[in-house]
Amino acid sequence: MLQTDAESIVSTYRFTPTPEDKDTSITCRASHDQDGVPDEEKTKETTVSLTVLYAPQNISISEPTAVRVGSSLTLSCHAEGNPRPDTQWKAIGPDGQAVIVGQSEELVLTEMTLVDAGQYECVVSNTIGNITASVNVIVQAPPTNTTITVSPASEVKEGESVTVSCLSDGAPVVRMVLRRLSEDQDVELQSSNGFSTSFTLSSALLADSALYQCQAFNEHGSQKVSALLSVEEYPLEVAMDVGVTAEMGSNLVLSCRAWGCPQPAFYWRSMLDMPVHSRAHTQDSLSQLYLGPLGLINEQAYTCEAKCGSVIKAKHAEVKVFSFPSDPIIENTGPFLEHGVGIFFCSVANVYPASLLQIQWLDGEIELASEMGQYSSELQNVTSMLSFSIGPEDQGRQITCRVSLQMDEVPQSGRERQAVTVLELHYAPRETTITVSPANEVKEGESVAVSCLSDGVPVGRMVLRRLSEDQDMELQSSNGSSTSFTLSSALLADSALYRCEAFNEHGSQRASTYITVKAPPRNTTVLIYPSAEVQEGQNVTICCHSVSFPPPAVVLRKLDNGTELYSPDGNFLLVNLTPNDTGLYQVNVTNDLGYETEIFSINVIEKHSSSSPDWNHVVIPAVCVGIMVTTTGLVLDYLRRARRKGFYELAKCKPGSA
């Protein structure tokens, strides 16, 4: 197909120019083989000149140079570059900082000093980049600015650290020598190559007071400087407690303090000049010696010695040891009997020093006796004895043993102890009493309590008994100072003698009382002998039996005519009975608490041969005879028996004889 439109053809050529390509040309040639076109028209070309821009290169700088102080020096620096580069000079200081000192290819330094020595840097740069080169400049000079310093000061205390330093300028590197110059010697202390040297006295002595000289020299010359060092003594002072008292077995710390010296050295010694430093602890200006547990061997003098340089000062401490570990113990030979002798012992164990121990016996605050212990170089058990007569008034008396260690250095709370004992008196029972409540006379059926009390030491045993005519009965017994027994419902049989007995190991005591139980008459019976039916002219004995107390009064009454007869013992004798005596009879038994009656009958069978006598004539003699007999014999015997047995009973009666 025929192409009728024109077409643009682009060709690209890429390459990296170098500085060597500057001032060269590049040609672009185009050609084609179209038929019919003249040969001169088939080829076309275009040429352009090439400009190459590049960073500085091929830098050249002056060689390292050594010059004398005061002279001049020219340094040069050159490099190629397009566009044309600029040149800048920098001086590099010892700390690495750069200072601009020039803006051209040549740097002129005039009247050079040691400060001008060092590294110089040339920086060549354009818009494309930069390049750097450097050169060292050496300034040669004899030592100058030589100085000597004393630190911390030219006046120091003995034992302090002090440093003597020398500095100097010079080129090439100088040699430094430090000397101590005194009246009789010249001592080289330190020497070294370089611009400085120093020497340190870690602990200055008085002999270090001198003139110190520093000399700096090299091949161009030398220089000397001097300084005076003065070493003075420390105003050392030492303090420590001169007397210390401590308890045996405890731990003790002795403190020694020094001042006027920053770092004193401490040394501890005992009285025997034996080192004890291993038990010491030192920090700064305080040294402490640890002793313990304390024994008698520690009772001695200790020396604290402080040293500061050539100054030595010492203090002494006297250590006293005491032992007073326990309260006293009181022992006695009691219990004591009244009117005997009491012996007391007061003992204190493991005392030191025993010679300073005071033992006081006190009754309240009244001193009974006092003594001091005996000297001993060992622990002692100290005992004191007290004896005195014991009286009844000493019961419960408090005896104090006060023990005090006469050492003012010991705290008050630790130098005095005491023990107290109470006197206990023993005695046999006394003041034994027996009491009856509510009263010694009670009614049958009432409650009655019998109590026993006694005073005796030691407390013993109480026994309560009931004693009657035919028995001895133990009612109650107990350990202690009292006992009691209660009759919840008293009987006539409980009327008896009651005895209380108190006893202990020292003896016994009794107390008694009588209890009477009262009751109204009861269980009354009437017996007729020989029979309730008799022949006229016979005798009849009437016996009344009743239980009561007090003894009753007995009255016999004939009911049909009211005739009464009295009998103290309840026995009536009717003699020579007649038919008129036939009838009902009543017996009335009476005491303070009541009465009881019984009715019975008697039948008299009449005899026709003779007439019956009157009642009054027949009975009265028998009654009189009965009264006389019973009053003198039976009544007294019955009363005695009644009081012993606790009840009353009419005696058995026998039929009277006709």
Image (tube, grey):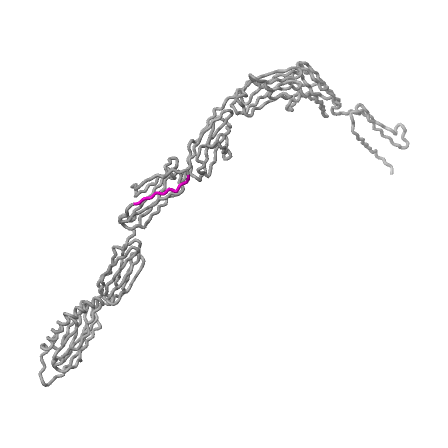
- The main secondary structure of the magenta stretch is strand
Q: Is residue 579 left or right of residue 57?
A: left
Q: Which residue is nearer to you in this view: 85 or 583? A: 583
For the question of whether residue 441 can be seen, the reply is yes
Q: Is residue 539 left or right of residue 374?
A: left
* Residue range corresponding to the magenta coloring: 378-387
Q: Is residue 479 above or below residue 245?
A: below
Where is residue 30 shown, x and y percent of the image? Answer: 85, 30
Q: Is residue 547 left or right of residue 54?
A: left
Where is residue 568 shown, x and y percent of the image? Answer: 15, 70
Q: Which residue is nearer to you in this view: 229 or 622? A: 622
For the question of whether residue 365 can be seen, the reply is no
Instruction: Name the residue at the bottom extreme.
Output: 608
Q: Is residue 139 above or below residue 384?
A: above
Q: Is residue 560 above or below residue 4?
A: below
Find out whether residue 267 is within the magenta segment: no
Residue 525 position by quadrant: bottom left
Kindly identify the residue that appears in the image at 13 percent across and 73 percent down.
Answer: 626
Tell me the quadrant of the picture where the N terminus can be found: top right
Tell me the quadrant of the picture where the C terminus can be found: bottom left
